[in-house]
Amino acid sequence: MAAVTLGITFPPGSLLLTILGWLVSKLPFGLPLPFQLNLFGGVMAVAVMGIVFYIALDLSRSIWSSESNDETVPPSLCALAIGCVVLTFALGWTTWRYSNKFTPYILTALMTGALLWAMLRWWRDADSGRSTWLALIMFCFGLDFSIHRTNMLLLPGFAVWILFRDPRTYRHLRNWAVAIGSLVIGLSAHLGIMAIARRNPIVNANDPSTWTRFYDYVSLKQFGGGWLVNLWPRKGPFFSHQMMDYLRAFAATFADPYGPLGPIGLLPCFLGLVGIVSLWRLRTQLAMGLIVLFLVSSLGAVLYFNLPMNFPWPMDRHYLPSFVIFTIFIAVGGVSVLRWVWRMRPAPRGAVLAGSIVLLVAMPASQWLRNHERVDQSRDLFAYEFAGNILKTVDRDAILIVQGDNLWPLWYRNVVEVTRPDVTVLSLSLMNAAWYVNQMLSRFPGMPVKLTEEEKAELGPKAWEGDSVFAVPVPQSTKIALARTGIVATDTVHLHAPPPVYMNLLLPQEWLLVAMIRENEWKRPIYFTDVPPWLAPNCRTEGIVHRLIPSDAPAIDCALLRRNLFEDYECHHGSLGGAAVADPLAWMPRSAAERYVHAFVQLAECEEQRGNTKGAVEARRRARTLFPEVVSDSL
């Protein structure tokens, strides 16, 4: 959504990815834009593998370049070993899962590769006294701030890297000036956020168009501020929870003995350890530098992110930089093993070499067999269909109020694809934020909400005035219009105000919703994807959304509900399967699927009340067929 419209995502954001995505979306390939952007994610992943392959091959050559018998090992065998290692990393669970979608995490891995390449070039060129590679490295660190900041964890590792290679670098003021200046230039790219925000794009999270709001944006005030540097107290047990989260992600990529080829899954980790030993023996200082980089990107990530207990989002995406570095160790280990085999006597060498090659090829094959079905999203149209079905359900000129991440697929189809432009899509979750409310009122001038300039500037909780029950009259013209659609409205609807949160105060999203309902006077239909509890008695299910009805006890419209579920909705069988079920974020599509199942249950109960047993059985059978993963046996 942000890439296609050149907007601002929620902090920390990913300015560079957004700009790249915006450029890619302009390419005339004639593909659906989400598919085109996801393909670009794959292109970035290919670039990651290319740079990791080049680094490993170049490093292997430099390590053994001084040995006279190096030419006896065919370069093609070294390339084959490194290629198998890189493919093993590419087809690993975490890498592959973030390679087939448009997210900043593969771009982060690409920047890790670029930083590693530049650091190794600096290592070779350190004695020359030139600052070219130092400038490039620090510029990349600054630019990474506009991707997702994860590589900033490597910065203290680079400081140690310099100490291992050439401590004299710190003695020259020119080097300090070059390093700080290059870092500042890279960081200044982030100012593009202010420039884009001032355009008032469709997606303008937190509206960082002023210096104050820009600082709040970059310092992550929305999530607690302080740049989220909160190392102590630990939000969960360090070893049993936080370290285990990293080790599980590491094992899923490099050390899984339970895959389709069994112990082959442990081979990448074993070769990585061999690579560390070989590198330590031949280039001790370089080995120490790479180990430090690995530690700050792995253990450092565990310390910095301070994973809370029961955190719903997987953190493995932030471990990708450490996986890139460990892949270099594996590649060195693979080449070391081939060199050892090549030095054997001719008699056994052929058989051992053939076996070694088979094992190397088996590593990526094992990853493919284990992960392909789990990461395959070629049939995953769930979010796209879910949004389309909601927009099909609502009546003309509707106000559609959504919560959480349900906003994004709906907003994309509504705004970018111009599906049902008559519908106004609003986020109840964001109505507590002044920036969103101001954007909402400026973008939809016909909204049935009137706020003073003071209320717009300082949006906050309000004291509830009046009784807990308030009446909303229904104009006679509205009653007549609704009667034509089969809705029987009362003269006056009595709504129970939401319970005050604290000391008779209502959150902005609550009093704004009350004001909207009052001001609307039932002129525009109002729908919810998630009904606030205090409005539940006045809403009826019309599919996967619920409509606010001007009645104190609205009855289900069986015919309308059946038409939506059986005729109008697109629900391709299997769209919830595959990646959606295997992914750790499966609770998101699963919770959305539960909305379909709830609607089918409502329809079945309605049909039973009408005496239509056949219709009730059909509704339950349809739910089981479409969503077997979420339907209970009792349905």
Image: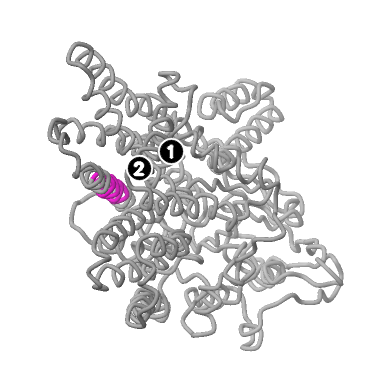
Q: Quadrant of residue 426?
A: bottom right
Residue at 47% in and 75% down: 443
What amino acid does circle 1 point to? Answer: Glu
Q: Residues within 10 Å of mark 2 (few under 14, many from 20)?
A: many
Residue at the disc numbered 2: 279
Q: Say which of 67 and 157 sits in front.
A: 67
Residue 51: within the magenta?
yes
Query: Relative to 255, does residue 139 appear above or below in the rendering?
Result: below
Query: Relative to 93, does residue 322 appear above or below in the rendering?
Result: below
Main structural element of the magenta stretch: helix, strand or loop?
helix
Q: Could you tell me which quadrant the N terminus lies in?
A: bottom left
Question: Left or right of 185: which side holds 569?
Answer: right
As measured in the structure, the alpha-carbon distance from the residue carrying label 2 to the one carrying label 1 is 56 Å
Residue at 70% in and 55% down: 234
Query: Relative to 44, does residue 210 appear above or below in the rendering?
Result: below
What span is in magenta? Answer: 40-53
Q: Could you tell me which quadrant the C terminus lies in?
A: top right
Q: Say which of 47 and 10 sits in front.
A: 47
Quick one: label 2 or label 1, which is nearer the N terminus? 2
Residue at 12% in and 35% down: 71
